Structure formats: C-alpha cells, structure tokens
Image (spheres, rainbow, N blue to C red):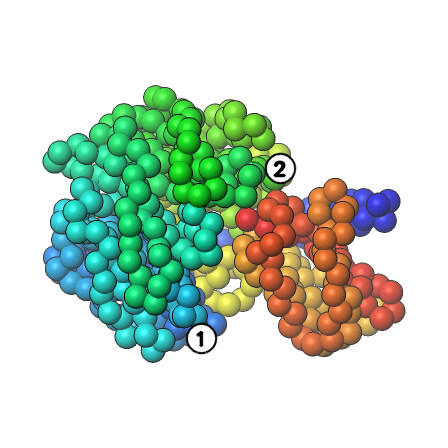
Amino acid sequence: MKKIAYSFIILLWSLSMFSQTIEFEQHIVSDTFTIGYDVSAADIDLDGKIDILACGKHNGGTVAWYRNEGSSSFTMSVLKEGFSGARSVRAADLNGDGDIDIVSAAWMINDIIYFVNDGNENFTEQMVDDDFKGAHTIDLKDVDEDGDLDILCSGFDYYGKNGEIAWWENDGADSISWTKQLISSRFQQSPFIFAEDMDNDGDKDVIACGELNNEILWWENNGAGVFISENMVDSPFYSAHTVIARDVDLDGDMDILGAGCMSSKLAWYENDGNQEFTKHSLPALGGDLWLDAFDLDADGDQDLIAAGMSSTQLKWFENNGSEQFTKRDIDGGFSSGFAIVPANMDSDGDIDLLAIGYASGTISWFENDLDSTTSIRQEIASGQIMLKVFPNPCKEQLSIYDIKGTAKVISIYSSSGELLRKMSSAGKETIINTGTLPKGLLIIETRFPDNSTQTTKVIRQ
C-alpha cells in the first residue's frame, strides 16, 4: 500500500509538471449545413477513425454522417432528408451484430427512427415511434440491464406543451421490437435526457430538465427499468436546456452539468455521494445550450466545454485541480453554437472538439495542439521506454501503446490502492477491457524487465 501511495504522489507531481496551456485550430467540415441542431462522434465504419453525425433543418430536415478519410477530409452521406424537425442523432451497436447503427429524433413530426447498419454502411430505416410528441434528444443506454442498448428520448412539444420523457425497451431480437416505457410527464417541454448511474448501485438512472418548468430532476432506476423515485436537483434553473452527468470532481460519483439557454446560465452540481447536490455557477456565454466535461489538457482533472448561441461562443473552462474553472477561448468558432462534443478526431491521443453552428450552417472540428510527448507520455531513463495511454477518460476500453514493444507487467489499482487486475504483455499495443472496472480514478502501473515503472492516472467513466 505504501508503494502505491508513493507512486500516486509522484504521479500527481508529474502531471502538474507536464500540464500546459492548449489551443485549438478550427477545421471546417461543412459550411452549408443549414440550421444545424446536433452533432455527435462515432467510428461508423470501424476503420479506427472517428466519423461525424449531424442533423438539422438542412433540406427540410437532414440526418447525415461524414466519413473521416484522414488528413481532415470528410465525405458526406445522407441518411434521410425531409425529416422535419430533425433534432438529435446518436450512434451505437443496437442489435448486437458488431457494427454501428444510428438513431435520430424529429420534434416537428414526432418521430424516432432507427437506422440499421448492414455492416457496409448501408442503412435501413426502422420506425421506433411515430407519435412521441416533440421527440427531441436521444440517449442510448442499457436501461433494464439485459445486455442490449435501449433508447431514451425527451419530448419538447412546442405546440401542445406535452413534455414526456420515456425509454423504449429493446427486446434483443435480430429485428428489434421497441416497447415504450414512460418515465415522467411532469415537464411542459423537456429538451434533454441523459442516463447514468447517479447513486452507484450499478444501474442507469435518468436525469432530465424542463425548459418551461425551469427544473432539473433525476429518477432512480430499480435495476429493471422501473423508475421508483423522482428527485429534484434544482428549481428554478431558468430555461433549462441541457443536463449531462459526469464525475467532475473525480470523487467516484456522478455530478450534473446544466445549461440554461434563454437565461444564459451554466452550472455544475456536486454530488456528495448521497445524491445531495451543491450548485456551482459558472460564467455564462450568452444563450447557453451545452455544457460537458473532459480532461482536455491531460493534467488529470476534468475541464469543461460549453456552447452558446451568441456570436463565436464556444469556450472551454480550465480546471486548476480543485474545481476552480478559468474560461478559455476556442479560436475560430461560429455564431450560434448548438452542440459541442469531445472526440479524438485525428487519432493523435489527445481530445479535440467537434461542434455545430445553428445560424452559420457550419460543422467544424477543433484540433487540440496538446504536445503529447510531454503531457500523456513519459520517458523512463532506463532504456528510454515511452508509453501512451488512451483514451483518458475511458469507458469500455483502454489502450496502452509502447513504441518498442517491450515485455511488461501491467497492474491496475483503485484510488485506494486495491489491486484490481494484473496482466503481462509483450506487444506494442495492449487493449484492456475496462467495462467491469469501477468508475472513477484508476492507477495504471506498468513495470518493465529492468524493474523501472511508469504510473498513469486514468478516469473510468
């Protein structure tokens, strides 16, 4: 235990020494995607490069994906046009066949559509629900813990003010049948839903917001997709538009990030571990629509990223390690930023940003200039072995890349020093499945034949 504690102290010192100021270079993917609402990132064709999904009012309502060809080149493929009110798009393997499918919602026609990938990026439409009023924001999570991904959606019924939030149960069949399960109808208009384990009991709870109600709440899942309690987080939070759950302070429980559009509000809510939340307000951007968290400068803490509808309002907030945040510019940008997503767009090991602009018709990615040779790799004097550990934070998988392919023993510890897993590897790249490891801080110790070690701090989300 003393050895691990000593390594952890040295690690924190190393991270503080190697942290650096970062800047972003804008790369325009499209400047003709009219009135873009949403953007997300996924490797649709499984070629190792992150592709882009987008939707918006373009051509009467368009859902499209952009194949990443490398060297900042993207090729657009339209999934659907005339999808009036196309508002959100997400991607994951829903039918368990190993390729990436796509789901999109359109609020004006109340539709949720599932695009089935045949493995060669030929997509077939399947209707999930053609009468979910104001179908707005999608999330894809395993709500009932049966091993497949379900669909969640918030309802922003602009005309009738019927703001249901619900999930659709995936029956696991090759040709999926979807069954709607209502979570709540308390909101007049609900623009956002997000599923995450808020109480650390191993299942996916739900957080959502009401824009007219000015509320943020979370619902407790009993493990079978039945939501047994409704819990207030904040009221009033005026014009609540986006809520996302991340472990902002890295204490092992999920906090909540919120953005309020018409009132121009940004805040994060600190979870004390017993689901009591303390609000921490942040400097507003103007028309705030998005707030998320990721370690952008690789110094071991969670920074924040935000988008607002005012001119060029894409910003990141640098964390000093104690959740004191300094607002930083993202050079370039565009008017009316609607969504901003962290993703490693150029496969260089650091986290770039992907964003879409409403008024500008622009989809861009912003290249992080982080010097990975000093921030996420460490040289070891004995033999000058160099490692790269990514992505960080991770979810289901972690890669350890050794440029020399040296024999090594990899040990994974919890933040308290408990040994969770140990393995040997001699290849250049070691892929570790992290889906069963506890969420929060992990310490990766890599030991080489000469008994030298590298210790790396990783966040499992």
Would you name the residue on which mark 1 appears? 47
> Does any portion of residue 138 appear in the rendered image?
no
For numbered disc 1, what is the local secondary structure? loop
Q: Residues within 10 Å of mark 1 (few under 14, many from 20)?
A: few
> In screen coordinates, is 230 left or right of 377?
left
Q: Where the N terminus falls, by quadrant?
A: top right
On screen, 228 above or below 117?
above
Identify the residue at horizontal 43%, vertical 51% (top origin): 142
Q: Residues within 10 Å of mark 2 (few under 14, many from 20)?
A: some
Identify the residue at horizontal 72%, vertical 61% (top origin): 378
Amino acid carrying mark 1 in the image: Asp
> In screen coordinates, is 196 left or right of 451?
left
Would you name the residue on which mark 2 appears? 251
Identify the residue at horizontal 22%, vertical 30% (top origin): 188
**Marked residue nearer the N-terminal end (1 or 2):** 1
Q: In this view of the protein, which residue sits in the foreground, 231 or 264?
A: 231
- Locate residue 375: give its quadrant: bottom right
On screen, 403 above or below 104?
below
Amino acid carrying mark 2 in the image: Asp
**Count the marks: how many?**
2
Identify the residue at horizontal 51%, vertical 57% (top origin): 351
> In screen coordinates, is 207 left or right of 250?
left
For numbered disc 2, what is the local secondary structure? loop
The Cα atoms of the two marked residues, 1 and 2, are separated by 35 Å
